[in-house]
Structure formats: structure tokens, C-alpha cells
Image: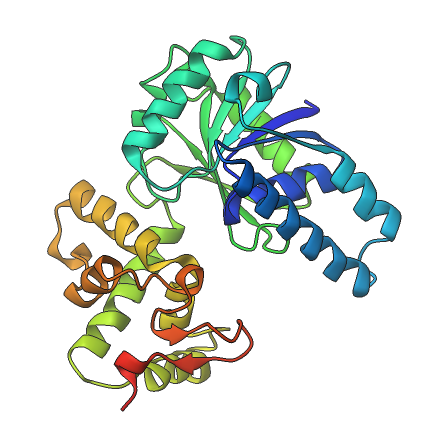
Amino acid sequence: MKNVAVIGAGTMGNGIAHTFAQFGYNVSLIDISQASLDKGLATITKNLDRMVAKEAISEADKQNTLNNITTFTSMEEGVKGVDLVVEAATENVDLKLKIFRDLDSITADNVILATNTSSISITKIAAETKRPDKVIGMHFMNPVPIMKLVEIIRGYSTSDEVTNLIMETSKKLNKVPVEVNDYPGFVANRILMPMINEAIITLHEGVAGVEEIDTVMKLGMAHPMGPLQLADFIGLDVCLAILEVLYEGFGNPKYAPCPLLVNMVTAGKRGVKTGEGFYSWTHGTKDLIVADNFKK
């Protein structure tokens, strides 16, 4: 397995492409927008420059990584000759199902189809294809080049052979793969999202402010960042989408998204990606300023 296609050049997609390319894979980075591809490549270049500055890689390593990536706006062109496709499009179930229907029709029968979904059922996605045994979840963590964990989610029909191959492939990327079964939210988000949601409820009910909530969790629970700051990094729209999947999947009111989260997403305040969430990010990620809506 040496040829990999990555669908989507956003935060997760360009990180996944970067990681495969850095470890010698030939990567086709695919997006419908050339502007998104250009932005994704610029992000990869910037992240590689940081690694060179920290002497984690050499300048030659950086160039080899970039040379391993080819961009495409045509999915059909981009997946020619690949062994593995990793879908990293927006966390939207209808979009993902369409992508997998299309991939099933334009890739060879032996190609493994993986999804980076953080919550959507692998079994449901696989059912859109004629190869459910070759459909699997590869849930990378953000930022992909740095974070070690990959949740490997096997659907109801995913074969042992495909699971073992993807586990070994993840290890070749210097990641730590953990195999989990296909239930809403898998492991990471089934545990993480209720915590983030409860932090938003705590803010919504006026128990404490943004900085106070995050400080309690950082200093009291040894978390590297507070849940509200983390939600901004993940994207409030992504948090909402995952909570909706959990709520629908389990039918338990404990997963119901906080009204404050719903309103913020509706108002376009989605965290780092829009410049404002619980914090203002207009000055960059190093200068945390509590957003005006939450200042005391």
C-alpha cells in the first residue's frame, strides 16, 4: 500500500495528507475547490516549516513530503491507481454517503475506503457500497501530524484482514491505533462531547465564566486546555453535529446539545475557523481573548 487519496483539503484532510506524505506515501489530495487545495498546501508547507525550525525534520524531508502530494479537483482522476482512500470531508452524513457511493463506482474493487468521521456510523456508510467488508473508520485527532491516536472503527461487516492492514498502516505513520466498535461517537467523542456540552451548560446557567470554567479543568483536572477552548479548536459546528448524532443514536437527553451552542453555531460563531467562539481568535491562537458576548 503506497498510493493514498485523501478527500477534502480542510483542517483534517490536509493534516492526513501531510502525515501520509511525510512517511513516504504517494498522496492524491482531492477537493472540489482549487482555492481550498491551495490553502491546504499552504498549511502543510507552514507546518513543515515549523518542523524544520524545531529540527524535527530536515529541509530535504520537507521537500520530499511536498513532492509526494499531488492535488486534484476531480475525484475520479485523483483516485486512479490508489490502494486506500481516506475521506475527510465535512461532518455531514448526506455528503459522506454520496461520496462513498461515488467512490464505490469509480475505484477498483480491492481499494479500501476509509472515513475520518468523528461520529457517523461506519456500518451506515458501508451500506452505501458494494464492498462493506473494505469500509473502515480512521478517526485521526487534530492536529494530525502531532497527535498520536487514531481510532480504528470497524463497521458490522468490516473484515479482519482490512482492520489488521489499517492498524499496521497507522503504525507506519508513527501513530497509536486503537480498535473500537461502531457505536455513536465511538470512544473519543462519546466521552469528550458530553463533557464539552456540560461545560457550555455550566456557562449558559451562569455558574461561572469562560475563563473560570477552563481554569478549573486545566488546573484541577490537569487538562492541557479547557473544554471551551477545546470546543473552539474543534469547531462549534462540529461539536454540535457530533452531539446531534449521539442524541439521535442513543435517544438519551444527556446528549441534547445546549441551546447556547445551537445559537452560537446559528449565529456563525464557530470557533477558531470563524475568528470567534467562546474566545476571540482574531489575534491568532496564542492570544486568547474572551469573546465580547462572554465578558463579565
Q: Note whether residue 156 is visible.
A: no
Q: Position of residue 78 (x, y in %)?
A: 59, 22
Image quadrant in which you'd find residue 26: top right
Q: Is residue 153 left or right of residue 174?
A: left
Residue at 58 percent of width and 47 percent of height:
39
Q: Is residue 296 left or right of residue 142?
A: left
Residue 48 vertical position relative to residue 285 in the rendered view, above or below: above
Residue at 55 percent of width and 11 percent of height:
110
Residue at 26 percent of width and 79 percent of height:
293
Quadrant for the C terminus, please.
bottom left
Q: Position of residue 259 (x, y in %)?
A: 15, 64
Residue 178 vertical position relative to residue 210 in the rendered view, above or below: above
Quadrant for the N terminus, please.
top right
Residue at 51 percent of width and 8 percent of height:
109
Q: Position of residue 156 (x, y in %)?
A: 34, 24
Q: Note whether residue 152 is visible.
A: yes
Q: Position of residue 250 (x, y in %)?
A: 17, 44
- Return the residue nearer the eye: 102 or 155: 102
Residue 122 vertical position relative to residue 55 in the rendered view, above or below: above
